[in-house]
Structures are given as structure tokens and as C-alpha cells.
Image (cartoon, grey):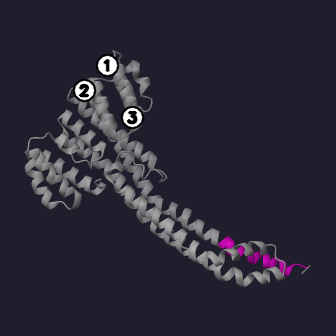
Amino acid sequence: MATVDELLALNDEIAALVRAGVPLEQGLTGLGRDLPGGAGRVATDLAERLGRGDPLEQALAAQGNLPPLYLCVVAAGLKSGRLAAALEGLSVAARRIAELRQATATALIYPLLVFLLGWGLFVGFTAFFAPTVLPSFRDFRVPSAEVIAWFAALGPSAAWWGAIGPVAVVSAVAAWWWQSRRAVSLAGGRSVAWIPGARRLLRLCHAAAFADILALLIEERVALPDALRLAAGASGSRSILHDAEALAGAIERGAAPREAIDLAGRFPPLVAWLLSAGEGRVLVSALRHAAGSYHERARQRAEVVQTFLPIGLTLAIGGGTVLAYALIMFLPWINLLNTLTSPST
């Protein structure tokens, strides 16, 4: 599967070639030599297929390593006759997800180092410190002696379980990094959906893509049911696609958009209202304005998430590690001091 960076590079180059009016098979042949890795191989293969007369949509589908979302965007762009605009809209959303992924990886470095250090200290505590102080805690009948005994009992097996924590955490981070770099993650953004604030960012990106491509299709007089299906598929949102299918089916059965708009309960609210109230050029202009509004809100949300994400992860992971280790270390000592200073001792 192509990576997000490779797909973005290929996408930008195809959009530039279309805008410049350069025949794709000629431009992609040169790109295949210039682009690195998988993007170059895809460009070369596309050039060969286009040279044999294959349509662009079919040539892309034959690659087998491009996400369905990308194919939907290309199909919508070709249908509207505005392929470059459709591809550029995808690039905006894809870059926000890629930047969020990069910011998350950077923000994880410091908390991960704190966790690994804290884990190492905990292993040392169970293997060396707890067995050493346990006799004293028992002699003075400190209430936390049984807790220290439990930690001391872990010490002999620390050689094998001590490595499990770091290996598991590092493996999980590596697996997330590998999974999130695949272009298929653009469809639903599941690889970044766990990040606080990311779900809202994804919904705004989906809404912007839906409104933008729907405006392109309606402007080119594509039938509304077809436009809804194509734009919803290109948005990357399953919920929007599901509701678009229901609304398109109702319109094909003779219902007016304003009468069937209740079937699109998961549409972006502004888009749903525009579909029920507007038509013609007014609708196209309003949809483009809505798309611009969603893009701006997505940009602002991305800036907020990227600003506060390092702080949040440091407090949650790093702060949690420090607090846990402090409690393990200092609570027994507090119990010991209280026992020693107690009048009954």
C-alpha cells in the first residue's frame, strides 16, 4: 500500500500536470524518474497504461495500492471536468492528517523516554531496593511492609518481565507509526482518531471535501443523485456516504431535496440546509463558501491540536509515570517515618 507522503507527492504532480495542460502519459514518464520510492513506480506504471489507451480512472484502479478514497476523488474530478481542483482539495485534507501524525510522533518522544526511565527505575526498585529494605520494614512493623514484600517478590523474575514493558510500548508506537503512514489511513483517519481533538478535525475535513466536490459536480450539471454519491465517496466519511445513498435514492424516486433532507441527518449541517433551500448557481456559490468555512475551521482545529498535544501527552504519560513512581517510592518511606516517630514505637 502506498504511503501518505507518496500519495501526496503523486497527487500534487498529477494536479500540476492537469493544470498545465501537459498530456499525463508524457508528464508521468518524467515523474517516474524523478519521484522516489513507490510514487515513482506508480507514476511509471500509470504512464505505460495511459500510453496504451487506458482511462486514468482504470489505470489508477489497476495499481492495487491506492486507497478507494483516492479513486473516488479522481472519479468525481473526471466527472466534473475539474480534476485538478478535486485533487488539490484532497491534498489539503491529506496534509492536515499527515502533519497531525508527524506532530503526534514528535510529541510522543519525551513522554516515551520518561516512561522508559521510570520503568527502568521500577525494575531496579523491585530487584534491589525492595529486598534490601524489607527486613527493616518488618522489624519495625511498618504497615506498608506487605507492599514492599510484594514488590520484593517480583525481583527474582525481573530479568524476564522487566523487558516486557519497554518492548510492548515501543512495539505499539512503531506499529502505529507504520500503520498511520499508509495512504489507506486517509479514508477514515483511524490511525489518528485516538488523539484528543482529532475526531473533530477529521469531521471538518470530510465536510470540506464533501461541500467542495459537490459544488464542482453541480456546477458541471451532474445529476444531483450522482453528484451526492460521488461527492460523498470522495469525502472519506462512511456516515456521509450512507446518508448520501439514502438521499440520492429518495430523489431518484421523485422526492424533492427539501422533502427528503431528513434522510441526511449525518450530513454537515450547513450543507444539508443549503441542499434543502438552494439550487442552481446560488447553491454552487453557497457550497463553495461552506467548503471554505470548513477548511478554515479545520485549519484552526489543527493548529490547536498541534499546539496542545505535546503538553497533554507529556502530562498524561510522563506525569503519570513520575507520579506512579513517586507514590511507590515515598509512601513506604512516609509510613516508616510515621512508625518511627509514633509514641508507641
Counting other residues with Cα less than 10 Å from the Cα at mark 1, is it few (<14), some (14-19), or many (20 or more)? few
Residue 252 is tagged as 1
User: Badge 2 is on which residue?
Assistant: 281
Magenta includes 339? yes
- Tell me where residue 166 appears, x and y as whole percent: 51, 70
Element type where label 1 sits in the image: helix
Q: Nearer the viewer, mark 2 or mark 3?
A: 3
**What is the magenta segment's predominant secondary structure?**
helix
Q: Is residue 62 left or right of residue 162?
A: left
Q: Earlier in the sequence, mark 3 or mark 1?
A: 3
- Tell me where residue 281 appears, x and y as whole percent: 24, 26
Give the magenta-colored segment's residue range.
326-343
Residue, far top: 254
The answer to which of 109 and 116 lies nearer the viewer is 116
| Kind of residue at disc 2 | Arg
Q: Nearer the viewer, mark 2 or mark 1?
A: 1
Q: Earlier in the sequence, mark 2 or mark 1?
A: 1
User: Badge 3 is on which residue?
Assistant: 240
- In whole angstroms, how far apart are the C-alphas of marks 2 and 3? 23 Å
